[in-house]
Image: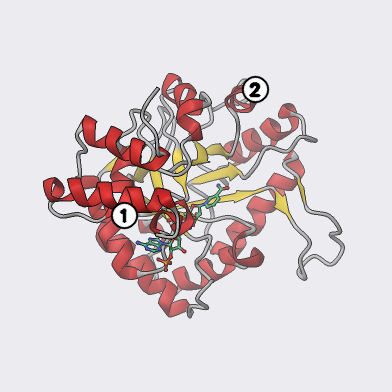
């Protein structure tokens, strides 16, 4: 069964793999299709669902809300995460001329109110600032997050795509410390292990959430040399791990990092969600972790 993890000392308890909904509407699913995906996640112990205001052309939260409502009580068995702060020109907002960020207190509060309504719930388990906004002061953003936690509309607050200094700056104004930084991390995007992001989160005992864990699918694009090397390396070590797939090794590689990243699964396919969930059972040996690192980079360690 999927392990569970308290993501920070003052944070919520989540499943160790989270289901992400960025691409959820790409294959034009019915509400029943989405509901089926949620039930499969629940059966596999994946109880935490990640979304965002902007996903699906600003339509993901509402679609998820409809799918949740098909099964009375389903929401109570899940942890809901959403994010706000990115605004791109879109037919739903004809007045918007330029893509921009806005993470002012007022905007965050309005976003949470809308998200609660769309999702059909009275609280979010985790609310994330989607991206740092260069034009909003940390005092303003923190005031918004602090008020949202105090009101009970959100159980906890975190950020996404923040640098370590941006995280520390905002955290210095928080009444309840931030509980995660959701960042891109995969075999093909290793920045957080080099740029201080994961060092800082270990210092704070805060688990990262890892987005695009399969590098958006490019991990399997055999037209690239990196994907070819990874496929070859995976074939060499897979027998040791029950003939698992590259996909499962790639999730296990992420979770092996000592900052304990929580992968956010992005596939829409039920069979892939199921096989992804088995990755928590793979304990990669140290040399195999490094062998995958070398295969991904195409050169040896420094
Ligand atoms: N905070 C942020 O700024 C941010 C940004 C991006 C994403 N996210 C979150 O992270 C989640 C995951 O991101 P992601 O969707 O980019 O995840 P991902 O797992 O890296 O990529 C998913 C894509 O890879 C494909 N794929 C997965 N396994 C495959 C395989 N074995 N062979 C071939 N293709 C495969 C999927 O296609 P199929 O559907 O056909 O399997 C899908 O198109 C999102 O849903 C969202 O919740 C957050």
Residue 94 against residue 240 in the figure, above or below: below
Mark 1 residue's CB less than 8 Å from ligand 1: yes
Query: Disc number at residue 169?
Result: 2
User: Residue drawn 41% across and 63% down?
Assistant: 267
For the residue pair 296 and 114, the one nearer the viewer reads as 296
Question: Which mark sits nearer the N-terminus, 2 or 1?
Answer: 2
Secondary element under disc 2, as helix, strand or loop, is: helix
- Residue 188 is left or right of residue 88, and the answer is left
Callout count: 2
Give the crowd class for mark 2: few <14, some 14-19, many >=20 residues within 10 Å.
some
Residue 8 against residue 67 in the figure, above or below: above
Query: Disc number at residue 160?
Result: none
Give the crowd class for mark 1: few <14, some 14-19, many >=20 residues within 10 Å.
many
Give the residue at mark 1: 247
Residue 31 against residue 280 in the figure, above or below: below
> x%, y% of residue 245?
24, 56
User: Residue drawn 42% across and 79% down?
Assistant: 32
> x%, y% of residue 174?
61, 26
Label 2 to label 1, Cα distance in Å? 36 Å
- Residue 102 is left or right of residue 22, and the answer is right
């Amino acid at each position: 069964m999927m392990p569970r993890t308290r993501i920070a000392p003052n944070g919520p308890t989540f499943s160790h793999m989270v289901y992400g909904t960025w691409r959820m509407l790409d294959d034009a699913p019915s509400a029943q299709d989405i509901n089926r995906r949620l039930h499969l996640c629940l059966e596999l112990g994946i109880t935490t669902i990640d979304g965002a205001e902007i996903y699906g052309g600003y339509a993901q939260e509402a679609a998820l809300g409809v799918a949740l409502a098909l099964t009375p009580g389903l929401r109570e068995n899940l942890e809901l995460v959403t994010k706000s702060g990115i605004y791109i020109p879109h037919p739903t907002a004809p007045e918007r001329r330029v893509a921009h960020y806005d993470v002012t207190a007022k905007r965050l509060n309005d976003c949470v109110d809308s998200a609660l309504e769309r999702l059909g719930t009275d609280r979010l388990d985790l609310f994330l600032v989607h991206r740092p906004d260069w034009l909003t002061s940390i005092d303003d953003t923190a005031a918004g997050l602090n008020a949202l936690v105090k009101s009970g509309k959100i159980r906890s607050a975190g950020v996404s795509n923040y640098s370590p200094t941006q995280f520390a700056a905002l955290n210095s104004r928080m009444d309840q410390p931030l509980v995660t930084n959701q960042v891109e991390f995969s075999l093909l995007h290793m920045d957080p292990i080099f740029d201080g992001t994961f060092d800082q989160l270990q210092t704070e005992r805060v688990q990262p959430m890892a987005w695009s864990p399969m590098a958006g699918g490019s991990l399997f694009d055999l037209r690239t040399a990196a994907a070819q090397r990874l496929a070859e390396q995976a074939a060499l070590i897979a027998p040791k791990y029950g003939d698992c797939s590259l996909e499962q090794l790639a999730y296990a590689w992420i979770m092996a990092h000592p900052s304990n990243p929580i992968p956010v699964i992005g596939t829409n396919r039920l069979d892939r969600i199921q096989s992804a969930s088995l990755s928590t059972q793979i304990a990669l040996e140290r040399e195999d972790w490094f062998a995958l690192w070398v295969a991904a980079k195409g050169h040896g360690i420094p």
